[in-house]
Amino acid sequence: MEKETSTSKKLLIEEFTRLSDLIKSKYGVSLWLVEIMGKRHSYVAGHKEESFLPPQVIHLNERFAIVSNNWNKIPEREKKKLLEHLNKFSGT
């Protein structure tokens, strides 16, 4: 079970990294993946960006979330496709 969880997390990270690179180049939006551990969100992958405004957190499931300061700059259809695709890797 632990090995399966580790493998699925690795696949999610690899796929997220690939997609966050595409989103960054196409829309100029930084996305990063966080692992949720209680109240703490731990950076896992992606393009982390510092800002004075609080970032938007988009939950994939109870364990992982996407964080972005400019989520609204991504077209709705692209957001939907991104979330549906990542949910295949996140175990939901």
Image (cartoon, grey):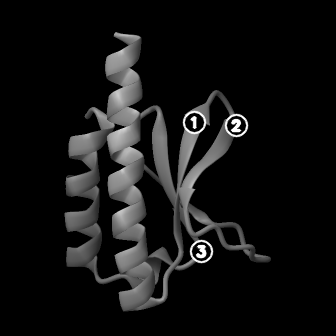
- The type of residue carrying mark 1 is Ile
Compared to residue 54, the image places residue 44 above or below, namely above
Q: In which quarter of the image is residue 19?
A: bottom left
Callout 2–callout 1 Cβ contact below 8 Å: yes
- The type of residue carrying mark 3 is Asn
Which residue is tagged 2?
40
For the question of whether residue 27 can be seen, the reply is yes
Q: Residue at x 20, y 66 (%)?
A: 81
Callout 1–callout 3 Cβ contact below 8 Å: no
At label 2, counting other C-alpha atoms closer than 10 Å, the crowd grade (few under 14, some 14-19, many 20 or more) is few
Which residue is tagged 1?
36
Task: Give coordinates of residue 83: x percent, y percent.
Answer: 28, 57
For the question of whether residue 60 can be seen, the reply is no
Report, in whole angstroms, how far the alpha carbon at label 2 lies from the one at label 3: 18 Å
Q: Residue at x 55, y 39 (%)?
A: 35
Task: Give coordinates of residue 50: x percent, y percent.
Answer: 74, 73
Judged from this view, the residue extending furthest toward the right is 52
Judged from this view, the residue extending furthest toward the top is 1
* Front residue of 3 and 66: 3
Q: Quadrant of residue 3?
A: top left
Report, in whole angstroms, how far the alpha carbon at label 1 lies from the one at label 3: 18 Å
Q: Which of marks 1 and 3 is nearer the N terminus?
A: 1
Specify the quadrant that holds the N terminus: top left
Q: Which of marks 2 and 3 is nearer the N terminus?
A: 2
- The type of residue carrying mark 2 is Arg
